[in-house]
Image (cartoon, rainbow, N blue to C red):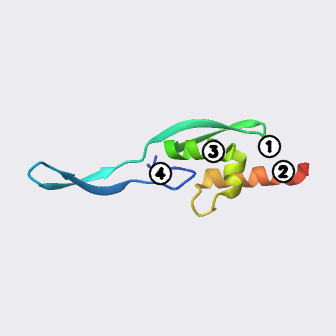
């Protein structure tokens, strides 16, 4: 399981631990990933995703998973999230 957010593509970054004596050693900054089930109003079911805490706030800010995925770039989404986005678009086209 990779340490990459399925909605934003946010992954590990590298940097340094810096001591009081200004010694630098390599380290990794890992994203704050959480396993969540987000509800899709269009599909009427939950979708399990592994997303960062900042992505979860962004989903809430945009008004839910359906609206977030509608504005999201396909290049940032994982294969699973891209599949869900296409399912939602297909269901919305059938409704309206």
Label 1, residues with CA under 10 Å away: few <14, some 14-19, many ≥20 = some
Label 4: few (<14), some or many (≥20) within 10 Å? some
Density class for disc 3 (Cα within 10 Å; few <14, some 14-19, many ≥20) is few
> Alpha-carbon neighbours of circle 2 within 10 Å: few (<14), some, or many (≥20)?
few
Instruction: Give the structural element (helix, strand or loop) at label 2.
Output: helix
Q: Tag 3's secondary structure?
A: helix
What's the CA distance linking mark 3 and mark 4?
21 Å
Q: Quadrant of residue 60?
A: top right
- Residue at 51% across, 45% down: 54
* Nearer-N-terminus badge (1/4): 4
Q: Which of disc 1 and disc 2 is earlier in sequence?
A: 1
Q: Which mark is residue 75?
A: none
Q: Secondary structure at mark 4?
A: loop
The residue shown at (18%, 54%) is 25
Q: Do the residues bearing badges 2 and 1 touch, measured as CB atoms within 8 Å?
A: yes
Measured as percent of width and height from the top left, residue 91 is found at: 83, 49
Which of the marked residues, 3 or 4, is nearer the chain's N terminus? 4
Q: Which residue is mark 1?
A: 42
Which residue, given by chain and number where applicable, does mark 2 sit on?
Answer: 92
**Observer-nearest of 21 and 10:** 21
Of callouts 2 and 4, the N-terminal one: 4
Residue 84 seen by the camera = no
Instruction: Tell me the tag on residue 61.
Output: 3
Is mark 3 in CB contact (under 8 Å) with mark 4? no
Residue 7 place in picture, x, y as percent: 58, 51
Q: CA distance from mark 2 to mark 1?
A: 7 Å
Q: Earlier in the sequence, mark 2 or mark 3?
A: 3
Q: 50 and 25: which one is in front?
A: 25
Q: Is 56 left, or right, of 31 in this rendering? A: right
Kindly report the distance in space between the C-alpha atoms of the residues bearing marks 1 and 4: 26 Å
Secondary structure of residue under mark 1: loop
Mark 2 → mark 3, Cα distance in angstroms:
21 Å
């Amino acid at each position: 399981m990779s340490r990459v957010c399925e909605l934003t593509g946010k992954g590990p970054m590298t940097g340094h631990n810096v001591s009081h004596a200004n010694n630098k050693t390599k380290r990794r900054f890992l994203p704050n990933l959480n396993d969540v089930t987000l509800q899709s109003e269009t599909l009427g079911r939950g979708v399990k995703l592994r997303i960062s805490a900042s992505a979860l706030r962004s989903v809430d800010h945009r008004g839910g998973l359906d609206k977030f995925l509608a504005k999201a770039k396909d290049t940032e989404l994982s294969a699973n999230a891209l599949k869900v986005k296409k399912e939602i678009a297909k269901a919305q086209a059938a409704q309206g």
